[in-house]
Amino acid sequence: MIEVRNLTKTFGKFKALDDLNLNFTDGKSIALIGPNGCGKTTLIKCILGLNVVEDGDILVEGKSVKDDYLYRNNIGYMPQIGRYPENMTIKQTLKMIKDTRNIADDLLDTELLEAFELEKLYPKKMGTLSGGTTQKVSAVLAFMFNPKIIILDEPTAGLDPLASEILKNKIIKEIAKGKLIIITSHLLSELDDMISEIVFLNEGKMIIHQSVEDLMTERKTEKISESIISILKEMKN
């Protein structure tokens, strides 16, 4: 569970998050969406400890992110653009991160590694990989250590249709295990069948936090994408 309490984050004169309060509950799959500059990336970076939390607080599994960095061991993160040592091979990169996490091989989740057939590409250096293959490496690392919380930032960006489907099926499996999944995406259509809640941010504030069922009932729509489009249209008027 993640609890965001009165979180405000500023960069100079720009207020990226404005007294934000949110609860993300275990077993939920949450779409974190909103227009560019709404605060999604800032919030994710605060949860991950990449942005310092000063005004307000974030609790992960009941512990403040200010007090203990080890909470991050329970989070798997797939960035929109993964950055890795360019001269290391895929095999070396995976080994380096496995050694850092110090988790026994029999406890690792290698389902995506096998489904993407990355072992065939082990000798390739990270700096030579296409964007799609780099995304596959990032996806493998996000799920590999069996985290309780998984944060996916534009997860299908650069992936081919088959890889996107493999990843989507993996996300659905992890949701069924009771994990908390947070997804940001500009491809609204890919959220259908995966998401149980919607959090819509604008100008650093929460505009909507609803279950998908309630949102679609209220908006009289049959798809998540249709509901979000109706919200965006209202904002323009």
Image (cartoon, rainbow, N blue to C red):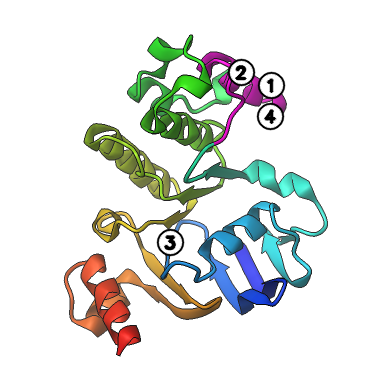
Q: Amino acid at mark 1?
A: Asp
For marks 2 and 3 on the same chain, the one whose residue lies earlier in the sequence:
3
The answer to whether residue 94 is magenta is yes
Residue displayed at 43% across by 35% down:
135
CB contact under 8 Å: marks 4 and 1: yes
Q: Is residue 155 left or right of residue 138?
A: left
The residues tagged by marks 1 and 3 sit, at their Cα atoms, a distance apart of 31 Å
Q: Which residue is mark 2?
A: 95
SS label for mark 4: helix
Residue displayed at 43% across by 61% down:
30
The answer to whether 156 is drawn above or below residue 126 in the figure is: below
Which region is colored magenta? 83-104
Asked whether residue 1 appears in the rendered view, the answer is no
The answer to whether 92 is drawn above or below residue 187 in the figure is: above
Q: Amino acid at mark 3?
A: Ile
Q: Dot 1: within a 10 Å radius of its alpha carbon, few (fewer than 14), some, or many (20 or more) residues?
A: few
The answer to whether residue 194 is magenta is no
Q: Position of residue 2 (x, y in %)?
A: 61, 62
Q: Which residue is mark 4?
A: 101
Q: Position of residue 92 (x, y in %)?
A: 59, 15
Q: Which residue is mark 3?
A: 30
Q: Position of residue 11 (x, y in %)?
A: 69, 69
Q: Is residue 34 left or right of residue 59?
A: left
Q: Dot 4: within a 10 Å radius of its alpha carbon, few (fewer than 14), some, or many (20 or more) residues?
A: few
Q: Residue furthest bottom?
A: 237
CB contact under 8 Å: marks 1 and 2: yes
Q: Which residue is mark 1?
A: 99
For marks 4 and 2 on the same chain, the one whose residue lies earlier in the sequence:
2
SS label for mark 3: strand
- Tell me the mark number nearer the camera, choosing from 2 and 3: 2
Camera-nearest residue between 217 and 165: 165
The residues tagged by marks 1 and 2 sit, at their Cα atoms, a distance apart of 6 Å
